[in-house]
Image (cartoon, rainbow, N blue to C red):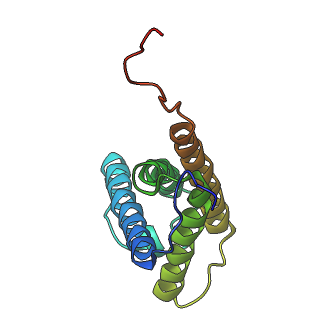
Amino acid sequence: MASHFRSYIWDPVLIVSQIVLMQCIYYSFLGLWLAGVDSLVHTNRSLDQIFSYGHLGFSSIQGRLSMMAFILNSLTCALGLWFFIRRGKQCLDFTVTVHFFHMIGCWIYNAHLPAALSWWLVNIACMALMAVLGEYLCMRTELRAIPVNTGPKSNL
């Protein structure tokens, strides 16, 4: 019987709770970032900023600021991966899951799949940024030196 550093036990309750937690982090902080952006340009807040494809665009200042909020949100979610997932191997999985559920939410909200190129570019860039930064932070924690000899030394 080989010993393992960590035991990998299939725990669906843990996985589902982590998915729900990451979705909550994603939408909570996206709402906060968008509220901050809206306070800068004095626009009204609405769910369209989160779920509508037309709000993300390069042509208007509001669209560019919304894209900035999505990018800042991916940085915040990478911290969420680091604090709550803590496994570098699982960061990409949880990142894709969060963005997949966001795409499903946008699809339901708009009644059709996203057609705007800017929406796809922003979400792919945010997915890459969140996964890479989350993996970096988790791997940095996982590769920390483990103190082996902490007891007092005896001279023999």
Q: Is residue 52 above or below residue 90?
A: below
Q: How far from the left and from the top, in percent, is residue 17? A: 37, 72
Which residue is at 56% across, 63% downward? 95
Q: How far from the left and from the top, in percent, is residue 11? A: 45, 74
Q: Is residue 101 above or below residue 136?
A: below
Q: How far from the left and from the top, in percent, is residue 3? A: 59, 55
Count the marks: how many? 0
Q: Is residue 66 above or below residue 144?
A: below
Residue 34, quarter of the rendered image: bottom left
Residue 59 visible in the displayed image: no
Q: Left of 4 or right of it: where is 38? A: left
Q: How far from the left and from the top, in percent, is residue 103? A: 55, 77
Which residue is at 50% across, 67% downward? 55
In this view, the residue farthest toward the top is 155
Which residue is at 30% across, 50% downward? 39
Residue 29, quarter of the rendered image: bottom left
